[in-house]
Amino acid sequence: MKLFAKSYSRREFIKTNLIAGTGAVMGAGTTSRVLASCTEINKNTPAVLGGSPLITSHDWPSWPVWKPETDEKRLLEVMRSGVWSRNKVTDEFEKKWAQLLGSKRCLAVVNGTNALNASLAQLEIGWGDEVLVTPYTFIASISCILFNGAIPVFVDVDPETFQMDPAKIEEKITPRTRAILPVHILGLPCDMERIMSIARKHNLLVVEDACQAWLAEINGKKVGTFGNAGCFSFQTSKNMPIGEGGAIISDDNAFMDRCFSYHNYGNPYGSTAGQIGVGTVMIGTKLRITEYQAAIGLAQLERLEEQTTIRNQNAEYLKSLIGKIPGIVPYRLYENVTKAAFHLFPFLYNKEYFKELPRNKFMEALHAEGVPCSGGYTELNKMPYLKNAFESKYYRKFYSAEQLDYDKYAQENRCPLNEKLCNELAVWIPQNILLGSKSDMGNIASAIEKVYLNAEKIKNKKS
Ligand SMILES: *Cc1c(COP(=O)(O)O)cnc(C)c1O
């Protein structure tokens, strides 16, 4: 917690005013008493109706974290050396990332999107193949499948865990299924043990999209190390921020050699930046990161483990608090999960317990109380990019008209639970909030409780 000790004093008054109450009843652990503890405060007019916000003038931990004293030395060395293209600092970063995750090899690339594109390409997942994927994700998890000419097949989610439901995978397998692409979305691990056993049974490749799940673990084994390849993102909003950046990890040397070659114009494995006359052995592109990106990455690596621990502790505490509010169901982790990454803190919102207050009004009220939140993803199995791909020259050349019957595809790929999750249930709190103090978590719970107690009034607000 010492990372953020500086900002505690500014929030001290909140702690003494509110959390003493919430904290005191935690041990008692009954629903009614948690609610009772803050009822007096929370009877006050909700901020969205003109009352005072529960969390005032609060500076949530800022993101990304950058500490000149410790972080700039390496970066300046790189800048002053004039060696800016891929070289020893990138090698060092890759080695450290592989070691930290318990993987044999790592290749740093320009971003998570291209880590996925390259991984699928080098596993020869492409034309004619179907890839099983969750609809509840960031677009890059799906565009990588189309980018390589394969067809995404959507597996509905388990709304409690927010992940691809492993119980629904097998019914989607056809003779054309080539791979599963589990996404550890929001930084909560998929049930990889179960997914790997399905993959083994049906002889499928597995590419893990761990672009939100740095250091997350299942039974002590890091996610990204279960499948044939694991992909990561280091974009600024991510928990391991470089600005832009990504990585592929794998224990498969031949695959990693091909990825290296692919990321460096198709030149042979081990050829360095600027080396001429080495020949070109395969179709490649250029996905190299710079030395200064690697230097930033090395600085960020110094705090990733500590931050991940803080996020886990705060998430668990916040979960224990808000789980007592009727109509609020926090995320559930699979039993084999030993650590999550918490790129987001998600919970389900059931408006039936909030006098039918719609989710957007609930979030608006929460915002007004000083809690940042959002409703998260929209349905990726229903967007125009899919039809656009199906209508493209290449898809028409490689697939039969029947396979490209979009209405049939849309029907077969309906995901009713994902629909509910996206449009009604999900609420996210961003990861930097989880780097706050324990009392901050109490304040978030109090804010949700305040909205709960005033749901009727908020619903009747004239907009
Ligand atoms: C961010 C993200 C990506 C893509 O990473 P970029 O570095 O932004 O290209 C892919 N998948 C998921 C789940 C992500 O969150």
Image (cartoon, rainbow, N blue to C red):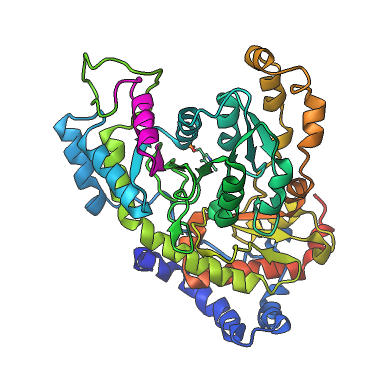
Q: Is residue 208 magenta?
A: no
67 in relation to 110, above or below: below
User: Which of 56/430 is in front?
Assistant: 430
Q: Position of residue 118 (x, y in %)?
A: 46, 30
Which quadrant holds residue 291?
top left
Tell me what residue is drawn at x 67 percent, y 66 percent.
448
Q: Position of residue 336 (x, y in %)?
A: 55, 64
Which quadrant holds residue 133?
top right
Tell me what residue is drawn at x 57 percent, y 65 percent.
55
Tell me what residue is drawn at x 23 percent, y 17 percent.
278
Q: Position of residue 222 (x, y in %)?
A: 44, 55
329 in relation to 226, above or below: below
| Number of numbered tags placed on the structure image | 0
The reply to whether residue 364 is in sight is no
Task: Return the residue found at the far left.
Answer: 81
Q: Quadrant of the N terminus?
A: bottom left
Q: Which residues are magenta?
A: 245-268
User: Which of 130/456 is in front?
Assistant: 130
454 in relation to 237, above or below: below
Q: Position of residue 65 (x, y in %)?
A: 37, 52
Does residue 78 appear left or right of residue 5 in this picture? left
User: Which of 113/25 is in front?
Assistant: 113
The reply to whether residue 136 is in sight is yes
255 in relation to 2, above or below: above
